[in-house]
Amino acid sequence: MTTTYTSRVPDAASAPAGVAAARATDLSKVYGQGETKVVALDRVSVDFRRAEFTAIMGPSGSGKSTLMHCMAGLDSVSSGSALIGDTELTTLKDKKLTKLRRDRIGFIFQAYNLLPTLNALENITLPLDIAGRKADKAWLDRVIETVGLSGRLNHRPSQLSGGQQQRVAVARALASRPEIIFGDEPTGNLDSRAGAEVLGFLRNSVRELGQTIVMVTHDPVAASYADRVVFLADGRIVDDMFGPTAESVLEHMKSLDARVRTS
Ligand SMILES: Nc1ncnc2c1ncn2[C@@H]1O[C@H](COP(=O)(O)OP(=O)(O)OP(=O)(O)O)[C@@H](O)[C@H]1O
């Protein structure tokens, strides 16, 4: 069963329950042409609801990263629609797309992408500083507390463990209260204990702060932290699982791999 926490989304307080933070409709992405043509996404339609944690899974090459990149305005689409809130990305010019990514979307990648000369706090507030926005102090304190970094704010990245560095990256993504955070294998570089910690913080940010998160992962354990898992195969959505466990996701992945091998 899925639980929504819409009333706790600060910037979406007036949004009706279950409303989509992002929506793909008949979204297709084709790379190359002729013999090199690859249909990476084949008329994908999916909603990512507010205050929900969604994992995207599927065999290698199934289109997970392409879907994330198209929905986050990092890649163009071939046809169909990609909405963030009610903003259509596919018709936005570069400048507006850059602004939308900066102001409304948070990103967490496998590589933490922290600046080595800045301390943890400076890294967390950097996107806000670049955008010329002031940090909301109460919110920032809550984010820092949620990700458990209060005692590490003056440390530089080199003085932090991998898990702590990724927690800085999580706090950085949360600091501006984006409408949605996209994560691409955010725990791919971490050992299982640090990975579990970061995933726990991501889940807390959904539960306690009302954040919306969409995460691409290969790892059934990581996916089990999500409220919902969307499965892709050959550029299409083939399954949608609510309340996943590591075991149920693993079983599903095995049957998908078998389907892909025999098709
Ligand atoms: N820039 C590109 N040019 C041509 N083909 C591409 C490009 N990017 C991705 N593809 C192809 O599109 C398909 C989907 O790729 P994508 O990276 O989205 O899959 P994925 O599910 O994220 O894979 P993985 O789990 O291996 O990271 C693959 O067949 C891939 O080879």
Image: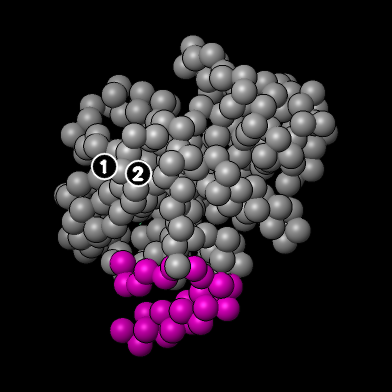
Upstream in sequence: badge 1 or badge 2: 2
Regarding mark 2 in the picture, which secondary structure is present there? strand
Question: In this figure, which residue is indicated by the disc labeled 2?
Answer: 21
Which amino acid type is shown beneath numbered disc 1? Leu
User: What is the three-letter code of the residue carrying label 2?
Assistant: Ala
245 versus 146 height, above or below: below
User: Residue 47 versus residue 12: which sits nearer the camera?
Assistant: 12
Q: Residues within 10 Å of mark 2 (few under 14, many from 20)?
A: many
**Is any part of residue 116 visible from this angle?**
no
Which of the numbered marks, if any, corresponds to residue 83?
1
- The answer to whether marks 1 and 2 mark residues whose Cβ atoms lie closer than 8 Å is no
Quadrant location of the N terminus? bottom left
Count the labels in the image: 2
Give how far across and how far down residue 111 sits, in percent.
61, 43
- Name the residue: 51% across, 50% down: 184
**Image check: 41 left or right of 255?**
left
25 falls in the magenta region:
no
* Mark 1 or 2, closer to the camera: 2
Name the residue rendered at 54%, 14% in the picture.
134
Look at 70% across and 35% down and name the residue there.
Answer: 145
What range is drawn magenta here? 237-263
| Secondary structure, magenta segment, majority class | helix
Residue 160 in view, yes or no: yes
